Amino acid sequence: GEQVEQRPPHLSVREGDSAVITCTYTDPNSYYFFWYKQEPGASLQLLMKVFSSTEINEGQGFTVLLNKKDKRLSLNLTAAHPGDSAAYFCAVSGGSNNRIFFGDGTQLVVKP
Amino acid sequence: NAGVIQTPRHKVTGKGQEATLWCEPISGHSAVFWYRQTIVQGLEFLTYFRNQAPIDDSGMPKERFSAQMPNQSHSTLKIQSTQPQDSAVYLCASSWTPTNERLFFGHGTKLSVL
């Protein structure tokens, strides 16, 4: 079945720096990709949903890149600020298995 | 829309006791998922239902854990003879369809087994 590997598990950056989180997946048939954000004490909230037809997706303060050839999905927070401190999870679906697969998460800390 | 509702928010049980966790999905959502979250293991898939039918329970521990969805408005996760290693946050999520839609997560039930 699908395997999703997320790196790094922990990431600490200074305010204003960029932070990059990467996920690799194994099922070439996967078609839908998600990034979720979990703030301390809160539940997971969708950050962005990405379709396989779009390689670059821009959100507010971040960019999601999808490389289907390498089966790699990345989240790039540009100019991170302390409010970005949270756990981030990638998720992959639409492949051979009929469900959504999550990465193990990245705990991001943005220091002032 | 109140979102996915999980009750209770916190549950403390003694070792060997039974724990039942409740989830009310968003009305109209056909898929309901259960996950377990711990610092060590991260987010673990347990099981999911589509239109109330159990579809995939490959993540459920073979013993002591069971999940049901008796109607479209709620699902339960039952843990018999709870053990300290069952301590975790149990998350319920629902979506319109199982695969290509975002999941809406509840706030979770924090289970502490003493």
Image (spheres, coloured by chain):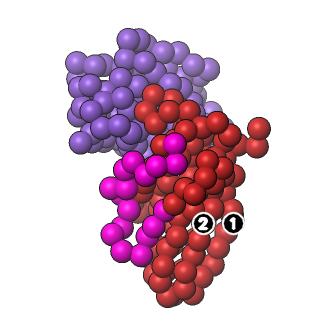
Give the magenta-colored segment's residue range: B51-67
Spatial separation of the CA atoms under disc 1 and disc 2: 7 Å
Letter of the chain shown purple in the rendering: A
Q: Disc 1 or 2, which lies upstream in sequence?
A: 1
Colour that chain B carries in the picture = red
> Which of the 4 quarters of the picture holds residue B105?
top right
Magenta-colored stretch includes residue B57: yes
Three-letter amino acid code of the residue under disc 2? Leu
The chain letter under disc 2 is: B
Three-letter amino acid code of the residue under disc 1? Pro
A41 left or right of A101 in image = right
Mark 1 touches mark 2? (CB < 8 Å)? yes
Q: Position of residue B37 (x, y in %)?
A: 49, 58
Q: Where is residue B45 in the image (x, y as percent from the top left)?
A: 41, 53
Q: Mark 2 points at which residue?
A: B21
Q: Is disc 1 placed on a helix, strand or loop?
A: loop
> For residue B90, which numbered disc appears in the image?
none
Q: Position of residue B99 (x, y in %)?
A: 43, 33
B105 left or right of B61 in image = right
Answer above or below: position of A108 versus A54.
below
> For residue B8, which numbered disc appears in the image?
1
